[in-house]
Amino acid sequence: MKTPALLVALVLAAAACETTTGPSSQPNPAGTVIAWFDGLAGTVDLYYPGCDSLVSPAYTAGSAPNDILFLGDDMLAVLNSLTPSLQVFDLSSSGTLLHEVELPQGSNPWAMAYGYEGIWITLLASHQVVEVSTDDWTIAGSVDVPDNPSGIAIAAGRIYVSHADWPVSSSPGGVTVLNAVTLEQEGWIDTGVNTSDLWYCTGTGSLHAMSTTYTGDGTVTIIDPLSCSIQAQVLTVGPPASPVKLGTGWACCESFGDTVYFYGYTGTPTAAWVPVESASLGGMAVSGDTLYMTDFGGDTVIRAFWETQSLIDPLPAGDGPQGMEAVARE
């Protein structure tokens, strides 16, 4: 395992870009940024495609970071599980921590969503959802939910919470529907056992739920958040994760596997692609014609032109790269 203190900033083509180092409160380049967290190193890396510049590490996170989210106004949130906390970093400057909120010990924070002037966080081991106020950066409230809350998304005036199969193995899975104002349960969507992840696609207004039994199967359930009805289901060979919008459809990767699944707006599978044999994919993000994929075991970020499924040179990453986010900074 790499030691975070030994990681240094890497500048791949600095002639057209200011040199950055991190994490040491140095200004970051302008423009679009691809951010990912390194789960084993407890760090965050930043890549700037406009000037081909990589800052690794850019920030120091907590132990076992588990989710990453752009909040706007150059604020990048990272959720840590083993040292339960929410951290918010300044995207304009490497090394700069803006806010840090401690979460309940032993709660295993899992995923987060942003809306209604708060950050909503699932606590997998505590069977709760908590709200962190972005006004004063404190825990503003909590609500009990069924066992194993994992994924979370906000849409159509509701908060959607998915349920995994751990630590309570008898959980039926599925998605709890909460009123975003009263936090009362409004419904339940049966997406199957171990629905571990949720993603709301702002471009199409659809909600995607990821489920698997870990027996060579997986299902992406596409939901209309207005009616809470299932529109389509896409079958995959392995556990699906990290969906992104690509042109007139979507793609998701096989969690800790090597396959990317492409599917259309009607839920019809269109292609399955292995960009790198035996990769352990975790996060995906897209910017323009380029698809970025973290390879946890290879400590790299795989890059490809998604339309032609042709590879570009990979990027080095910290130890165990996982979730990622593409941010179009102003």
Image (tube, rainbow, N blue to C red):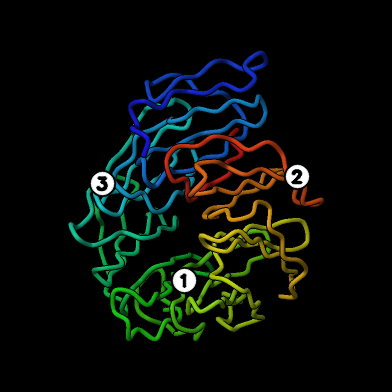
Place of residue 225 in the rendered image (x, y in percent of width and height, measured from the top left) = 57, 74
Q: Amino acid at mark 1?
A: Arg
Please, what secondary structure does the residue beneath circle 2 have? loop
Q: In the image, which is nearer the foreground, mark 2 or mark 3? A: 2
Q: CA distance from mark 2 to mark 3?
A: 36 Å
User: Of circles 1 and 3, which is in front?
Assistant: 3
Residue linked to disc 1:
158
The quarter of the rendered structure image containing the C terminus is top right
Q: Residue furthest left?
A: 105
Amino acid bearing label 3: Val
* Residue found 59% across the figure and 74% down from its top: 220
Which label sits in the foreground, 1 or 2? 2
Give the number of the disc on residue 101: 3
CA gap, disc 1 to disc 2? Answer: 32 Å
Above or below 128: residue 20: above
Mark 1 or mark 2: whose residue is earlier in sequence: 1
- Residue type at the position of mark 2: Asp
Instruction: Look at the numbered disc 1 and give the secondary structure of its residue.
Output: strand
Q: Quadrant of residue 264?
A: bottom right
- Taking the spot 49% from the left edge, 49% from the top edge, the residue there is 296
**Residue 27 as seen in the image, left or right of residue 167:** right
Above/below status of 172 relative to 142: below
Q: In front here: 13 or 299?
A: 299
In the rendered image, which residue does mark 2 sit on? 289
Extreme residue in the front direction: 278
Question: What is the spatial separation of the Cα atoms under label 1 and label 3, in whole angstroms?
Answer: 24 Å
Q: Position of residue 268 (x, y in %)?
A: 75, 75
Report the residue at 45% width, 70% height from top.
196
Q: Percent x, y for residue 297?
A: 48, 49
Query: Mark 3 packing: few (<14 Cα in 10 Å), some, or many (20+)?
Result: some
From the viewer's side, name the closer residue of 63 and 258: 258
